[in-house]
């Protein structure tokens, strides 16, 4: 038992580096289609793991991921012509962090379903507001983004997110968030400044989402508010985490890989009925796997 | 001129408010009793609108008549959805929090299925139908379409009947009691599974009725018309306080007036934005909702 634990942990320590090296070489041997697919899978992994960092651990379910992802997309669309790409990414991260701080200060006083509804409305609100702005003020719909290959930006950002979340889990912030998830009252009694931790955790998680949105935007070439603030970006990370299993970092990663590949398969095989089947699969996942895939597998193995 | 537009706002806002309170009351009842936050609420509303459209174009039934058939039909659909899908989840959830979270995601999946099924079955085209007009009605010098006024009246009548049902029938009292004390209710012998199934189906019925009425009000319907109404209903549930019937009506009028004023004075496209901004402001002052007990 002890021996396998050590082996597993050393494997876990080195496997990310190995995977990163393999993925970094992917453009030299993979086909364009597979590379594009890999890009979206990586993006979903990043989103799911960022969502899990805050909502999965604290159980404050945010359905506003699309809001932060969309802001990132729009920042790239607006500034990519006048600024170098890395600077745009930094700007997107900073703006999302600050915006999420404000949103968190307002909404994190609310528990449970109220928080979920408010964050869900946030994406819709931004969608509507930007649509209005574009139609009334600038008189356009959507924007063009200079298309570039985003494989490396997404790969690097996703790995940075994974590594920083693994490191953050051991810090006071990460432990505080986990304690809030177990019992917020107990955390308050232990002297944890829960408001500060919640708002900070939410801002960090949202910053990552915005970063991914900003890096992913050039893939589309053309974006509008409906694409950027699609409610799929709010719900999918949650469903992926639920599928993979909350509580461990590996859960959302597995969930994101399986579900995004499944989505791609369905899209290419059943074009017209793809959305219906995907919705049906979501329902089945939620009914059949209350503790997630990894939860089930780990329980079986012990 | 000024009193003209004031009157227009007073009456137009009231009409919208009556309809909104009907849109939200089903969701509020569902969530209050079953703890399932049905984010597919607006999509059941959309089905109601389509049923009214088809019974008008194919069977030549006036929506004010077909509403009588649509209600029980959708009640049945709601009952099937609850017993076939949601009941399993209720049984396998360990805590109330877990149930709320999972039901939210499950209903999103449901919304996804319904919207896209509707698109495949009925195409994404915008459809509209002209209900025979009953002429205009003159209210203090402002002209209103008679149909609009009738719709507002029907919404209010449905709300009154629902109030009487919740207040005076045994079933209604059990529902209200479950909102306050779910465990206590089980202890005194309420079959909570059946009660939840009935409340959920009743919520679907109310959503479909709201959809039928809205199909008369709005010029066109389409498979994706539901989402804004889901949002309005969610906002109203927060504003009213969960399980608060009176709060729901009052909140409906608040949102109704707010939307109508935004539409008439600022811009129709900004309605949701303003409603949402006001919601945030209210929650800052009263985190448990404007009319929470």
Image: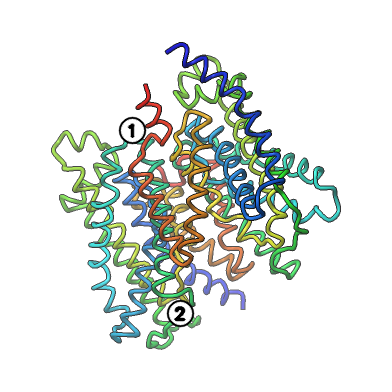
As drawn, the residue found furthest toward the front would be A29
Q: Position of residue B57 (x, y in %)?
A: 35, 85
When the figure is inspected, residue A183 is found, relative to residue B155, above or below; the finding is above
Instruction: Residue at 47%, 57% (x, y): give it.
Output: A266
Instruction: Residue at 21%, 48% (x, y): give it.
Output: B195
When the figure is inspected, residue A214 is found, relative to residue B55, above or below; the finding is above
Drawn side of residue A88 relative to residue B243, left or right: right
Q: Position of residue A67 (x, y in %)?
A: 61, 49
The dot on residue B127 is 2
Drawn side of residue B178 relative to residue A166, left or right: left
Q: Nearer the viewer, residue B23 or A225?
A: A225
**Which quadrant of the figure contains the C terminus of chain A?**
top left
**Which quadrant of the figure contains the N terminus of chain A?**
top left
Tell me where residue A152 sits by quadrant: top right
Dot 1 and dot 2 within a common chain = yes
Residue named by callout 1: B95
How many other residues sit within 10 Å of disc 1, few (<14), some (14-19) or many (≥20)?
few
Give the mark nearer the N terminus: 1 vs 2: 1
Drawn side of residue B1 relative to residue A24, left or right: left
As drawn, the residue found furthest toward the top would be A2
As drawn, the residue found furthest toward the left would be B189
How many other residues sit within 10 Å of disc 2, few (<14), some (14-19) or many (≥20)?
some
Q: Disc 2: which chain?
A: B
């Amino acid at each position: 038992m002890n021996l396998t634990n050590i082996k597993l942990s050393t494997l876990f320590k080195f496997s990310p580096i190995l995977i990163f090296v393999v993925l970094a070489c992917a453009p030299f041997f993979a086909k364009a289609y597979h590379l594009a697919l890999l890009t979206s899978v990586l993006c979903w992994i990043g989103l799911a793991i960022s969502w899990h960092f805050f909502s999965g651990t604290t159980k404050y379910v945010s359905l506003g991921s699309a809001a932060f992802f969309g802001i990132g997309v729009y920042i790239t669309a607006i500034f990519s012509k006048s600024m170098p790409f890395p600077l745009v990414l930094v700007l997107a991260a900073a703006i999302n962090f600050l915006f999420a701080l404000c949103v968190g200060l307002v909404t994190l006083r609310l528990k449970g379903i109220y928080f979920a509804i408010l964050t869900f409305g946030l994406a819709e609100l931004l969608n509507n507001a930007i649509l209005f702005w574009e139609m009334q003020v600038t008189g356009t719909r959507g924007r063009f983004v200079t298309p570039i290959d985003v494989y490396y930006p997404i790969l690097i950002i996703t790995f940075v997110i994974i590594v920083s979340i693994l490191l953050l889990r051991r810090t006071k912030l990460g432990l505080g968030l986990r304690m809030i998830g177990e019992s917020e009252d107990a955390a308050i009694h232990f002297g944890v400044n829960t408001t500060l931790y919640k708002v900070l955790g939410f801002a960090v998680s949202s910053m990552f989402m915005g970063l991914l949105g900003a890096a992913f935007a050039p893939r589309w070439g053309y974006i509008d508010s409906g694409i950027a603030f699609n409610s799929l970006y709010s719900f999918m990370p949650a469903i992926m985490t639920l599928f993979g299993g909350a509580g461990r970092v590996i859960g959302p990663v597995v969930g994101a890989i399986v579900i995004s590949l499944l989505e791609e398969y369905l899209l290419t095989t059943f074009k017209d009925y793809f959305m219906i089947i995907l919705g049906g699969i979501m329902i089945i996942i939620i009914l059949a796997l209350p503790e997630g895939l990894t939860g089930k597998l780990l329980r079986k193995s012990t | 001129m000024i009193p003209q537009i004031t009157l227009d706002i007073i009456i137009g806002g009231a009409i919208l408010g009556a309809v909104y309170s009907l849109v939200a009351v089903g969701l509020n009842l569902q969530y209050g009793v079953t703890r399932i936050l049905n984010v597919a609420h607006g999509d059941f509303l959309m089905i109601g609108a389509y049923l009214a459209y088809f019974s008008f174009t194919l069977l030549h039934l006036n929506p004010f008549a077909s509403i009588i058939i649509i209600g029980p039909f959708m009640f049945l659909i709601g009952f099937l959805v609850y017993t076939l899908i949601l009941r399993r989840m209720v049984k396998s959830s360990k805590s109330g929090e877990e149930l709320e979270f999972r039901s939210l995601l499950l209903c999103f999946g449901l919304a996804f299925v319904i919207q896209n099924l509707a698109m495949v079955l009925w195409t994404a085209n915008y459809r509209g139908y002209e209900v025979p007009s009953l002429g205009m009605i003159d209210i203090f010098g402002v002209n209103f379409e008679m149909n609009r006024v009738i719709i507002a009246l029907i919404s209010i009548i449905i709300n009154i009947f629902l109030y009487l049902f919740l207040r005076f029938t045994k079933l209604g009292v059990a529902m209200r009691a479950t909102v306050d004390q779910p465990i206590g209710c089980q202890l005194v012998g309420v079959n909570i599974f059946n009660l939840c199934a009935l409340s959920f189906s009743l919520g679907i019925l109310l959503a479909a009725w709201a959809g039928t009425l809205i199909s008369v009000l709005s010029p066109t319907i389409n498979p994706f018309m539901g989402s804004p109404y889901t949002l309005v209903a969610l906002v109203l549930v927060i504003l009213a306080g969960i399980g608060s019937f009176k709060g729901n009506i009052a909140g409906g009028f608040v949102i109704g007036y707010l939307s109508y004023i935004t539409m008439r004075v600022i811009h129709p496209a900004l309605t949701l934005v303003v409603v949402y901004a006001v919601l945030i402001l209210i929650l800052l002052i009263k985190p448990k909702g404007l009319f929470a007990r």
